[in-house]
Image: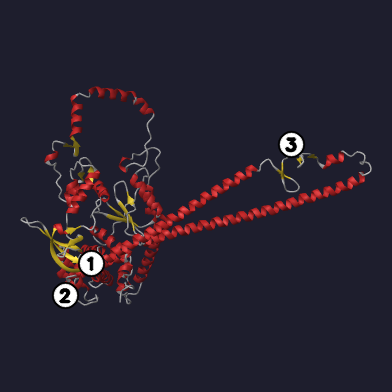
Amino acid sequence: MTPALRTIQFSMLSLKDLAHTIAAKLQEHLFVGAELHGKRKKGDLCPCKILKVLEDITVKTKYEVAWLDRNKKVTETAVVNRDDLIWKKSPFSRNSLKPFIRKSTRQSFPWVLHDKLAEKYRISRDLPQDLKGKVFIQDGVVYNKRKKDAMEVKDSGKLKKKKVEAEEAEASNKEDNHQKEEPIKYPIDDLLVQPETDDPVFTVRPLPSRDFNVPMDGVGDLLMVWDFLSSFSKLLHLWPFSLEDFENAICCKGSNVNLIVETHSSLIRLLKSEKDECFLAVQKRTRALKITLTNWTDYLCDFLEIINIGDLSTHITTIKRGHYGLLDAQVKLGILRELVNQVLETDIAREKLAGYVEERQVLLSMKRGEALEEGRKKREEKEWLKAKSADNGATNGHGVDSTGNNQPVLSNGNHIGQNGQIAKNKGEAFSTRPNHASNNSRHLEIESKKTGKKKNMGVESQAEKRIDLTKKEALLLLRDEKIAASTWSIKEQRRAYFERELEKRILHTNPLGKDRDYNRYWWFKRDGRVFVESSDSKLWGYYCCKEEIDALMGSLNPKGERERALQKQVEKFYSRICLELQKRSKDLATKIALEEAVHRRSTRVRALPRENLANAFLNYVNRWKED
């Protein structure tokens, strides 16, 4: 960090050139823990890791390295020159350094670091000598000399004519601007949002509860450690437990609380099985192979001696005397935080995370493939419907003859035969035979009655056919609705499946978002509450009921960028948050009822300490403990 930030501070290079310069410098800069290839005496290249930097003014810098085998185990150590060390690959690419430069700076050309970042890494905020003639500082902002010269020219009056013309143009367009103001395109930065008449009535944001058992400075560590232990419980062989039980166990003054013992033992066991550098020295000591209730503090003291952090090392004597429970809650959380950090650096944890990344990529590719296939089917269906409608339009204006063949129909209702002659109706044929009308009058009446009956029968048969058609259409519609409902349910099931599987392979918990004051909001899926972290991370609180969540959503202004994004995330998980909060409220009601039942007992029958629900963490048993 420090060499990169020093290169960035007050640099006049472009983003591309600056990233290239930093990448080249970091490639030359070697540090303790870097893994590269080194030349041995025989001239062959072997993987190695830098253990120590040996600096000498008279000679070139040398490095103490450890030669590694295929399993990354140390075979031997040696001292080599810088020329004998070669990177496997560049430690930082130019593309990865560009976002780092943007996030680290508050302005460009020249690039200026954020004040807090410069103060943290002790980077000078004074202008270097070579830039004093090129840039200047005004109101805390660094400007180029070109801008300064332009400002001086404006002040001297050389650009007075242009200024007058601009003022005249502004005055001429002032009325038009008043009449026709451009509407603001929301969302914008939350601090720039002004109240307007068309705004809805926002509710008052509720004050979060702050009744934590641990000190306020330790709430962040409490949530981080508990979230890690819950997310990687199978890797640690640690049965999950609630956040309340973990908080009560941390605050308990007992030295051998089973939940605390199993938590430390699982973390130390993983480090021990990994043969991490922190426990290389422990192997020389005579320790029992199995971590038990009686010797877990010995391993914990060894760990604190190895990491050698001043604030934590001072408590080794207290732990060795068997008084771990008397430590402050903040100290206990600090020890667990360092254990978690060491576990995250092990190969086992990295392989697990890499496996999660690959599995998530496979799931996301499957999800994208199904979405593309669904889109393709929709396009094909639309094309088929268009083709069908075109075919139906081509047959308009044609009739069907008695034989079932399509023939043109004239305006008078007559049909044109294949020979081009017009075939008239039966009524016209009878009217052209007057000689036979008197002889066959009775026959005509009989036939007319028969034809009338046939017509009636034809009408009835057509009605029956229509009824049959409507029944068939209804059945077809019902079938289509069932098919559509089943396909919709299948889509919902697949979507829920992908979300469920992706959540199982979560890499880390991200905040829901920020409000206008940059307060962060967190929701952990294994705890119903929504936690609120202040912008400086010094103050914590939480919402624990549905009414508070509703009031929070009603207080967010969607015209602001941060609160709009936060509102979307809360709406996304709203049903699940409310479900978890309902479960939590039911559990609390059950606990209160049981506590009242215990208090109503006779004074002659006293409840054991483990029967008190506040001490429920004492009943914890690690069901996934390794034999």
- 600 horizontally vs 38: left or right: right
Q: Say the numbered circle drawn on residue 285.
A: 2
Q: Which residue carries the number 1 mark?
A: 72
Tell me if residue 56 comes above or below residue 205 in the rendering. Answer: below
Q: Position of residue 487 (x, y in %)?
A: 52, 57
Q: Nearer the viewer, mark 3 or mark 1?
A: 1
Q: In 3D space, how far apart are the residues under numbered discs 2 and 3 (Cα atoms)?
A: 111 Å
Residue at far right of view: 439
Residue at far front of view: 42
How many labels were placed on the picture?
3
Q: Nearer the viewer, residue 243 or 239?
A: 239
> Which amino acid, by three-letter code, is at mark 1?
Lys
Of labels 3 and 1, earlier in sequence is: 1
In the picture, which quadrant includes the C terminus? bottom left
At horizontal 93% and vertical 39% (from top left) the residue drawn is 435
Give the quadrant of residue 302.
bottom left
